[in-house]
Structure formats: C-alpha cells, structure tokens
Amino acid sequence: MKKRTRILCAVVAVFLAFQGYYAFYYGYTYEKPYYSPNQAFYYQKYRLFSWSRWIPSIGMPGDGAQSLYNTGGYVRVFRADGTLEGQFYNNCVAMTEVHWTGDSIVGFGCDESGDNLVELSADGG
C-alpha cells in the first residue's frame, strides 16, 4: 500500500512539474495560427502564466481594457510543417501587431526592445 501511494505521489509530482513548466515557459496559445502569403510559414501567439492576472484591478479612465491584456508571451514562427523557425518575447503579446515582410516577420507591441524580429529561412521549409 505504501509503495502504491509513493508511486502515485511521484506521478502527480511529475505531472504538476510538467504543467508548471508548460505554463511558465512554453505558454498557452492565445490566437489561431496566421499563415504567410506564400503559406510556407505561420506564426502563433503564446501567452505565459502571470500572477497579476489573479489580482483584481481597475483600469484608469481612457485605458480601456488594456490592463486585461498586459500578459507577456511569445510570438512563435513555424514552418508549414510545424518546425519552429524562431520566436520573440513581448510584454503584452495580446496587443502585438505582427507583419510579414519579404524575408522576416516583425512584431510591434508595447515592448520597445527592438528584438521583435524573426528572419525566415530562404527555403521556406
């Protein structure tokens, strides 16, 4: 009986560790995938877990619902076959506008670090 309990506790601990890793690092999909004009690549937004989402807050006048979207996350760019091409982090991934250029993808959001660029490979998959 004790052995079974230990095994069950170990399985639950591994499951919770995986879920924590997934929420804090990998993130959860925020929107549907958006394909490039030539259908060779797509990007998808992933939001990360944030403790601030659990704290009730009241927005300031004129702020709209912006405070609801201030969750950091990644914009990940994939080839059409699902291979990760690159990613960039933004402090408010929900409000990040993404644009395709000829050989890269650029994101504009509230993070002004200038690292919101993923260069695409020439072969396209």
Image: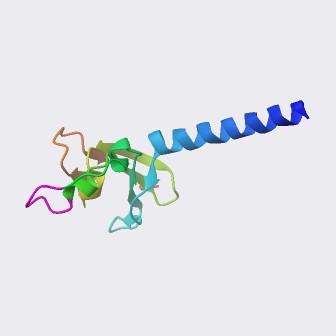
Percent position of residue 2, x then y: 88, 31
Nearer-the-camera pick, 6 or 32? 6
Percent position of residue 94, x then y: 29, 57
- Number of callouts in the render? 0
Report the magenta stretch's main SS.
Answer: loop
Quarter of the image with the N terminus in it: top right
Q: Is residue 29 visible?
A: yes
Q: Is residue 64 magenta?
A: yes
Q: From which residue to which does the magenta span run?
A: 59-65
Residue at position x 62%, y 40% from top?
16
Q: Is residue 114 above or below residue 3?
A: below
Residue at position x 33%, y 47% from top?
55
Q: Is residue 19 above or below residue 6?
A: below
Percent position of residue 20, x then y: 53, 40
Q: Is residue 108 magenta?
A: no
Residue at position x 39%, y 58% from top?
44
112 displayed left or right of 70: left
68 displayed left or right of 77: left
Q: Is residue 120 visible?
A: no
